[in-house]
Every structure is written in C-alpha cells, then in structure tokens.
Amino acid sequence: MKLSPDAVISLEKVANYLLLWRPENDKSKFLAEGGYQMEDPERLVEDIRGQLLPLEAEFIEDTDYGRMFRITGTLNGPNGRGLRVVSVWMTEAESGTTKFITLYPAKEN
C-alpha cells in the first residue's frame, strides 16, 4: 500500500534528531555518507518525501497511538551516493494523519 503523499515530515525532527550527532543510536554519520548535512535539513526532508514516501509501505503493527508502517528503499543523497534505509511511519488513530517517525540503515542480506 502507499501512504498519503501529504504525510507530515517534521523538519525539527530531521534537524535535531537524524542530522544531529548523538552518542547512542547516531544516524548523522550514516546520513553524512550520502552528503546529508546539518546545515541543510530541508534536503533530507525533500528526499524522504520524494524518494521514500512514494514506495510501497509494509504494515508493521497496530499500537494504542495508530498503525505503524515501514518503507524500505534507497535515498540517493546530494553527493550521488545511495543509502539503503528503512523508514518508519505512523498513521495516527485519532487524527488519521500519517507522520514520519524515523529512519535507520537497512541491514543487507
């Protein structure tokens, strides 16, 4: 299934969580391999929306807050390098709004 093209992708979450170095569960170093930088979080938001969101979503589970989905795909970064990622999304039970939750490197088989 496809998720709503109007899904919410928080610029603040991208800038202050994905692109900000963290001592645990850091994703900024991985994303930097594709050329994504803290100075341009809008680029990562655009690429998530344009490259991942149109792909097929796989249902994960129902939670108290909503339905969880996963989209696995390749982000082609600003430097031309492709990053295989898993993105997690939730369609809120109360509002019906679909929101981007996180992404992380895909494990290759």
Image (cartoon, rainbow, N blue to C red):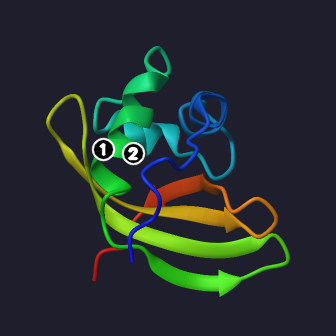
Which numbered disc covers residue 83? Answer: none
Q: Residue furthest top?
A: 39
Question: Is the residue 39 above or below the residue 70 in the image?
Answer: above
* Residue drawn at the location 23% of the way across and 29% of the way down: 78
According to the picture, the residue beneath numbered tag 2 turns out to be: 48
Q: Quadrant of the C terminus?
A: bottom left
Q: Quadrant of the N terminus?
A: bottom left
Question: Is the residue 10 above or below the residue 105 in the image?
Answer: above
In the image, 94 versus 44, the foreground residue is 94
Say which amino acid is labelled 1: Gly
Which numbered disc covers residue 50? Answer: 1
Q: Residue furthest front?
A: 95
Q: Secondary structure at mark 2?
A: helix
Category of crowding for the residue at label 1, using alpha-carbon neighbours closer than 10 angstroms: few (below 14), some (14–19), many (at least 20):
few
Q: Quadrant of residue 22?
A: top right
Say which amino acid is labelled 2: Ile
User: Foreground mark, 1 or 2?
Assistant: 1
x, y percentage for residue 95? 76, 59
Are the two marked residues, 1 and 2, in contact with CB atoms closer than 8 angstroms?
Answer: yes
- Residue 79 visible? The answer is yes
